[in-house]
Image (tube, helix red, strand yellow):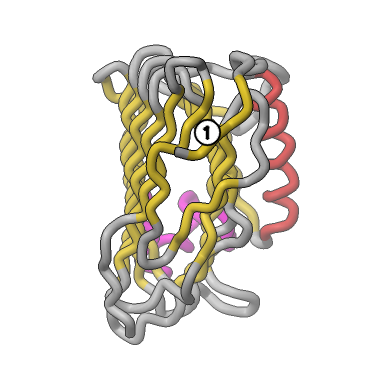
Amino acid sequence: MTGESAEPTVVTVELDCSGRHIARELRPGAFLAPRPLLPSPDRLRIALVGTRAGLLAGDDLRLDVSVGPGARLELVEPSGLVAYDHRGGTSSWRARVDIAEGGELHWDARPFVISAGARVERSMEVSLAAGARMLWRDTLVLGRSGERGGGVRAMTHATYDGGELLVEDLDLMDPETRELPGILGPNRVIGSVTALGTAPGGRPHPYRTDLAGPGAQVRLLDTVAPAAEAELAAVWEQWLADGGPGVPGQPVTTG
């Protein structure tokens, strides 16, 4: 048990008066350190680099991401996250995302593995202004190889221009309940690609759900990760292409 609960990892990006992307704040937290990557001409690319093992019982990982008006950010995760056996305790993972008018965030998250004995509460709060967009890929894996997996409650609340766009409370804490037919059954991989602030076109997908406002989600269940990850990657690339190019900008700087 580490019981880490420090200040959150903070990523704040914006456009300056000349149209350059600026990393206004990159502040490391207890578990993740934001690191600039080679710039693209139309967006800022930031890696979320793990700085310690976790999650363990008592840990509280927090992440605050802000994208200014017209700015574009790509978050990169070099590796996934593992919640280890909590030995009766709990941990939490909390992210808050604010995207201003005309801003855009691409977040291709790596798998989040919930080991046997872990109990995790995960929450994602997203606020999009009018004209803002977010593309998010997310995979939960219940257990490492050969494990039944611990418990996770994943809550997502996204608003667009002040109105609710996506509200979800996915309670997978109890293995006996989640393994019932009609919930997960034998599946232990839950993966999704979610578009917020825009409704992607392209080829139809049998597991696509259109949201209450501008947005859509494709969610897949599987017993193993590779097949689901491959299909999600195809959806991600299609929706990424459908979003079109961003506004050309000048070279990215950090300030």
Q: Does the magenta stretch include residue 6?
A: no
Residue 203 sits above or below residue 152 on the image: above
Residue 161's quadrant in the figure?
Answer: top left
Residue 40's quadrant in the figure?
Answer: top right
Residue for point 55% across, 34% down? 253
Residue 226: x %, y % from top left: 73, 57
Camera sees residue 176: no
Q: Which amino acid does label 1 sit on?
A: Leu
In the displayed structure, does residue 220 sit left or right of residue 154?
right
Extent of the magenta region: 170-191
Under circle 1, the secondary element is strand
Residue for point 44% across, 38% down? 255
Residue 106 sits above or below residue 28 on the image: above
Residue for point 36% across, 81% down? 86
* Crowding near the residue tagged with mark 1, few <14, some 14–19, many ≥20 C-alpha atoms within 10 Å: many
In the displayed structure, does residue 46 sit left or right of residue 132?
right
User: In this figure, what is the number of numbered marks?
Assistant: 1
Residue 22 sits above or below residue 102 on the image: below
Residue 252: x %, y % from top left: 58, 31
Q: Name the residue under label 1.
A: 73
Residue 203 sits above or below residue 105 on the image: above
Residue 225: x %, y % from top left: 67, 58
Camera sees residue 94: yes
Residue for point 48% across, 49% down? 182
